[in-house]
Image (spheres, coloured by chain):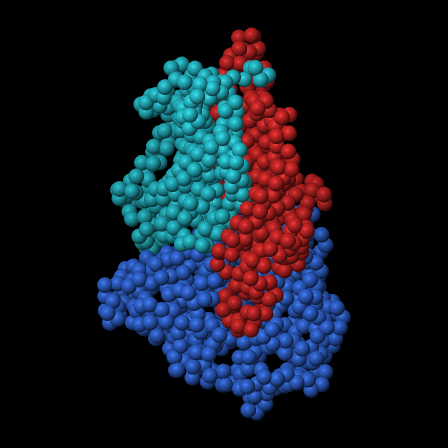
Chain colours: A blue, B cyan, C red
Amino acid sequence: MTFRPSRKRAGLAILAGPAALALMVTGCSSANEPDPQSTSGSGTLVAAITADPDTLFPWKATQFQAVNVLENIYGTLTQFDDELNVVPGLAEKWEPSEDGTQVTLTLRDGVTFHDGSEFDADDVKHSLDLIRDEATAAVAAASIGSVTDVEVVDPLTVTLTLSAPDAGLMANLANVNVAMLSSDDTEEDLNTEPNGTGAFVYVDRTPNQSIKLEANEDYWGDAASLSSLEFRIIADETSIVSALQSGDVQFAVLNDPLVAKTAEGSGISVVGTPQLSYHALQLNATKGALTDVNVRLAMQCAIDRQQVLDTAALGEGEVTGPITSPAFKSDPEARPCPERDLDKAKEYLAKAGMADGVTVKTIVSQGSYATSVNEAQNLQAQLAEAGITLDLEVLEAGAYVDRWIAADFEAAVALNGGRPDPDGMYGRYFPSTGNLNQVAGYNSPELDALFAEGKATMDADERKSIYDEISQHLEDNAAWIWLFTSYTYTATTDTVDGFTPMANGSLQNLRSTTVSN
Amino acid sequence: MSAEVTVDTTALQAPAKGRGSVLAGILRSPSGLIGLLLTGAVVTLGLLSVFNLLPFDPIAQRPEVRLQGPSGEHWFGTDQFGRDILSRTASGVANSLLISVVAVAFAAIIGTAGGLIAGFFRGWSDRSISGVTNVLFAFPPLLLALSLASAFDRTWFTIAVAIAIVYAPIFVRVARGPVLSLREADFVRSATVVGMRRFAIIWQHILPNIGAIVIVQITLSLSWAVLTEASLSFLGLGTPPPAASLGAMIFEARTLVNFAPWTMFAPGAVIILLVVGLNLLGDGLRDALDPRNRGTK
Amino acid sequence: MRTITRHPIARKLAEAALTLLGVAVLVFVMLRATRGDQISATLGIEAAALTPAQRAALEAYYGLDQPLVVQFFSWLGNVVTGNLGYSSRSRQSVLEMTADSLPITFELAVLSIIIGLLIGVPLGMLSASRANSLRDAFGQTVGLAGLSIPAFLLGSTMLALSASMLGYNPNARGFASFAEDPWLNLQQMLMPALVLGFGLAAPIMRTARSALLEVRSMDFVRTARSKGAGPVRVQLKHVLHNALVPIVTMTGLQFGYLLGGAVVVEQIFSIPGIGRQVLIGIQQKEYAVVQSTVLVIALSFVIINLLTDLLYRVIDPRVRAQ
């Protein structure tokens, strides 16, 4: 067995250490010689992904696989380092004005797109203007909504004018959905022939089978060590493990903790990385009995989060509060019921006048992520002991999304994406003006004020305490019930080295990865 | 060649025998006997669940005993929620059989009737029934199941209906083929000539002759329906939790099998026993129902 | 011969066209009855954050802003002229996609059926020849046990064992069509065809056994025996020949099923067949892809049915003579 602890801080948080995992090993370890025919040249990495990217246009890419591929092709003004700090990307530096309503970006000199054209301030203006234009239907429009004007000062300087100071803006610019595109390209062009500034150049694609990239020799940073990178689509995670075992695939990210454990037992090196995304029971405080805060609190008190984690994901994860990013992390114990307390749950129910029990209609998706149905089953069993009936509606993934976006549910078992910046993460859910507030189902004047304050505050420590307050408010009112964060698992053969997984699930470090064939 | 092909009309005209002799027929053939025993054993297990005679509640969770191997208390171990696998398997048999039996009953009745009418009357009824059959056949079963699962609340009944719609066309085709041949047989022609009414001919002469093949098809379809329900679980369209079904249990155990192999054993063994049992029982039934076997052994 | 004159080709074609029209209407209605559209399928929960203007722009982009009737007839009109639509996700026309995926599934289906027949027919003959021996019943039980494992379980177990114990996993290499690399292609087809073939062998065996018993007890076989024909000759010439109708029916049915029904195996073994094309189309709510692909599958069905009907006439003189 070759369990390698991640070298990064994030990786050390893994609970199931090598000793615990060793007990699970039942498979035999085979030699796993890579098939010489499978890898053509030296420095070729084949990475398995479970689905074909549904778009190659970065402004509309929300699917994990699409983001994973595109962040290797496209560049952004800022980017995240391995600890998710915002660091310079295509913008070498940035300077906010005194009152915080203007930001002046200095662009990196000598950057070219893959087609050879120069990257300059016109491309930045072109990109940001189009993203903000509703007709483009770019998913990041709202995240840079504070930008009211983009002005080209000179070819390497751009000034952004903001409606109000926005502490989360620079983090939002690191998202591949705000990728910088050449002003010569159209969406139609880029859908067939991606043209970015990233470390890898798009070569070709066989739909539903593979996407091939090669190293960008002119990349502004350190050029990739791999000469080529192929994303191969293998839909079933169990089949991916088999592909790693035979050496035909050398790299994959697994999500199902059970599959990851199986892989671990068979000689593949597996590294678990805690994720920003979080598992939660979303409550819709505008529907049914849940409008009463006491019912929501009763549910919070009736749930042992560790038990959900243990049964649904075999303990592979960590109990969490609302904010998951390391710099702003919520204290998971800071809530009315840090431990399960059935008596208190019944008290709350009695206070709500529902001592006889209450029924909550809950939607669950089946098939979109591995643990959803298991979580729902355990939540149902736990809540039943407090007299709360979780009426489960198990839906096919597409139907679930449709119900979710229409806020057509009382409660939803959900796995939601997290972001490094807490404003980017919850600024769209809980302020009454947030574009997902209808789905979040909860808002309050206090929260509105706190979110506005958090956005306007630049000082890191002050921000931290504001978001602690937000987190506390959300838990005290049981807006939702935050359960746990899980891991993703980077599975590699022993020929692969130098990849650092990140808590946001990014595969940007494929550019520093090496493979010895 | 055609002169050689005749149907033993005397046997066909023999009066149907009672239920008891069918059972006796099954018991006479070893495969039928084994099939009856296997199916009976599995059905008994399912009945235990129906009559609440299980050692544990198949749904209640006891996380403190989760993922335990077989023991005196839990003969076949517990799953990741601490549910007793034996009890869950029994309840899964009941649920899977309920879905399969309802689905196949619908499919067999509608499909066989359609096949008889289409094959015997030909003409426009054949064209319209075959038309509908072809339309349904042409549908990927997955799309049917998905549409139904998405358009209605997913319950055991909608799953049964989805499976029934997938299987009904098979019965149409299986029945129609032989009827095409039979309607040209001498004994059917002579019955027509002597002025027998056509539905009476179907009832007395055609149906008994395709009975065997339909019954074989029913037992086969039952076992396929159990497996189809399992495949639907693979695609995330199976029986909604927390109810147990054999397919869903096997699907869940698939990823657990490396460190908790007992989670696979009971549902896996039972689904194999059930499928094999139903197949063998189908053989036995076929032999017992076959007019030509009556009284010859 | 009269049959053919009574059923002119024109009439068969009209029938086929009606079937296809039925399929077209049904698939169109079913897709619209399922929840969600390509916008929510592509953007996922981010679709909730769209402003009305953004949503309108996307609806226009995906052609969802047209009335349903217009969507239906413009699609059907295009299909009639050979334009099956376009997948905005794959950046390919559905015709191109299908030209790649249909032959792959076709090949898989043929191989599976060959394997199914190779296992099923001999087993059926064996069991019919000694239908009532206890030893044979046990043999059947064991054989059936192997055939009663769900395909997803058999498939992934086979793949896992082959990869971990032998390091052999041709399906993890990029898929090669038969034209590109016949040897690799056959290796990649082997395991999925075995899994499907095992599944097919059981019904083929039951049907063969049942049909053989039926035919064997008929007078002409007894006559042939009494005339002194040896058991092997009787078995092969008279019995098997006459048992072909139900076997052909069964096989034809299974072949049709495999076109759309091999999807689980295609998924596990990463075979880019037509079943996966439909599945991905459904998941992504790419209406044009699903509608046209289902129509293509339906067309294949119609053709296979015609061939099965023709085969009846060749095999069974009673049908021919009517």
Image-quadrant location for residue A133:
bottom right
* Residue in the foreground of this view, choosing between A283 and A267: A283
Picture residue at 66% right of the left edge, 64% below the top: A191
Question: Outermost residue toward the bottom?
Answer: A98
Picture residue at 32% right of the left edge, 22% below the top: B18
Picture residue at 59% right of the left edge, 40% below the top: C15
Q: Can see residue C308? A: yes
Task: Name the image quarter holding the N terminus of chain C.
Answer: top right
Task: Name the image quarter holding the C terminus of chain C.
Answer: top right
Question: Outermost residue toward the top?
Answer: C227
* Residue in the foreground of this view, choosing between B160 and A446: B160
Looking at the picture, does residue A106 appear above or below residue C136?
A: below
Image-quadrant location for residue B105:
top left
Question: Outermost residue toward the front?
Answer: B195
Q: Position of residue C139 (x, y in %)?
A: 47, 26
Q: Can see residue A67? A: no
Q: Position of residue A319 (x, y in %)?
A: 40, 66
Looking at the picture, does residue A348 appear above or below residue B123?
A: below
* Residue in the foreground of this view, choosing between B167 and A34: B167
Image-quadrant location for residue A157:
bottom right
Q: How many marks?
A: 0
Q: Position of residue C110 (x, y in %)?
A: 62, 36
Looking at the picture, does residue C183 appear above or below residue C37?
A: above
Picture residue at 26% right of the left edge, 42% below the top: B51
* Residue in the foreground of this view, choosing between A93 and A345: A345
Looking at the picture, does residue A404 appear above or below residue A323?
A: above
Q: Position of residue C221 (x, y in %)?
A: 53, 14
